[in-house]
Amino acid sequence: MRLFKRSCIVFSGLILMWELLVLALHLPSYILPSPAQVFFSGSENFSTLAAHALPTIIETLLGLMLGIVFGCSTAILMAIFRHARFWLLPILVVSQAIPTFAIAPLLVIWFGYGIAAKIITTVLMIFYPITSAFYDGLRQTDPGWLDLAKTMQAKQWQIFWHIRIPAALPNLASGIRVATVIAPIGAVVGEWVGASRGLGYLMLNANARMQIDLMFAALFVIVIFSLLLYFSVDKSLRYFITWQTEN
Amino acid sequence: MQTSPPTVFVRNATLSFQGTLLFNNLNLTLRAGEWTCLLGASGVGKSTLLRLIANLIPMSTPDGADMTCDNAIPLASQIAYMGQADLLLPWLSVLDNVLLGARLRGKKLSPMLKNKARDLLIQANLRKALALYPHQLSGGMRQRVALVRTLMEEKPIVLMDEPFSALDTITRLTLQTLAAKLLKNRTVLFVTHDPLEALRLANKIYVMYGEPVTLYSPFDLNSLTPRDPYDTEVLARQADLFRELEKVYAGNL
């Protein structure tokens, strides 16, 4: 929670500086609106913001869940099967090397303007951090534990289930933390390229109409949602994974 | 429950490691129900020999060892192993760590099994630690949990690789006494670099030196174990053993 407090302080400091900057430079609101203007615009358009926030939130959460499922299964496959590792590793690297921004339009063509394309963008963005973190954890099991388990006449899958997976969970948790921060970006990028709803769509629309204050209001909703998501995910990870795998 | 402990024969153990011949037709007998202690300098191959017996070393073609025991049961299934690190799993409580073997083999954790674990933990003076997690324990307590975990395996052969070397002297003496009591009448191979430890616990001491390795037993010990650290036989033999080890460490035996 101390991190939360610190984030709040840093955040309010930045807003204060911004307000002062706008006042000092007499910037017109279509270039840079002041935080106060953004706030008023936000409260004026509250129902619009809420209506557009909902799809973004749903896309982010579904994308995050699917990304975790795919990432974990890929990491487990790679850790168990040498051949899977051989064929999946390039896919993993490519998934990160291809700029998601560039193929997002393609995804819209393939999967339409609906929610699917956005979820896929999100999954693409978080697949690599989750898979690589979990895979690293699965590979780095303390060899002493493996020896001990072998002398206890455990089978490979039993060792995997009872030792290697729990030992890798702290690594998976770091991967999920990174993914949680990126996931909303994935959804918004998806919305930028082609959507009729969502905060990304709203931002683009407001920008085109020079409603910069509304654009900033939408941006703030994204930021606040991202922060809330991160802190709740972090908190539950800490609750479930209390150990550090380092002996 | 527990089968009577067998004698273990290691014959013609041959093993190369990174181009050096570590063992060349090495022979070792672990007498039934007795503690055999292996002493020697670090890196001479004590742990390697123990791991070889524990079947933890993958063998390449020119390597090999003929390992047998004098009952008809496969050797690997009669062995419990305890390492220098306690190897406790940080996500399991003390009680669950002790039940690790059963859990790993997919055995049902019956109330009987749990009671047995609890009784053994209490015998090891860990009554208050049952529900604690490893990071809440001291080094001595952790090693006692590891000892109980080893006992829970109910194996007639126990291989111990410097299990108490990371502990302070007094804690180490306490744990030696406890281990000697709890592992009485099992066939034990105990690797150590502490002469006093060997003299307190061993029925048979081997000193290990050279490349490839030679094993020899400097003297016999006949009194009951665990011997007190200030026992006259222990003190007299300690002087002998120090001399032997000095010679071996200097490499001019």
Image (cartoon, helix red, strand yellow):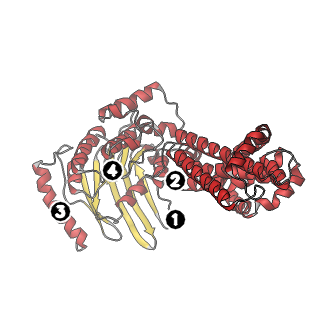
- Which numbered disc, 2 or 3, marks the residue closer to the eye? 2
Q: Residues within 10 Å of mark 2 (few under 14, many from 20)?
A: some
Q: What is the CA distance from the residue labelled 2 to the residue labelled 1?
A: 24 Å
As shown in the figure, which amino acid type bears the numbered disc 2? Thr
The secondary structure type at the circle numbered 3 is: helix
- Of the numbered discs 4 and 3, the one sitting upstream in the chain is 4
Q: Chain of mark 4?
A: B
- Which numbered disc, 4 or 1, marks the residue closer to the eye? 4
Residue bearing the label numbered 2: A141
Q: Is residue A198 left or right of residue B243?
A: right
Q: Chain of mark 1?
A: B
- Of the numbered discs 3 and 1, the one sitting upstream in the chain is 1
B151 or B124: nearer the viewer: B124
The part of the image, by quadrant, that contains residue A236 is top right
Residue B38 visible in the shown view: yes
Label for residue B163? Answer: 4
Residue bearing the label numbered 3: B242
As shown in the figure, which amino acid type bears the numbered disc 4? Pro
- Whether B44 is drawn above or below B172: the answer is below
As shown in the figure, which amino acid type bears the numbered disc 3? Phe
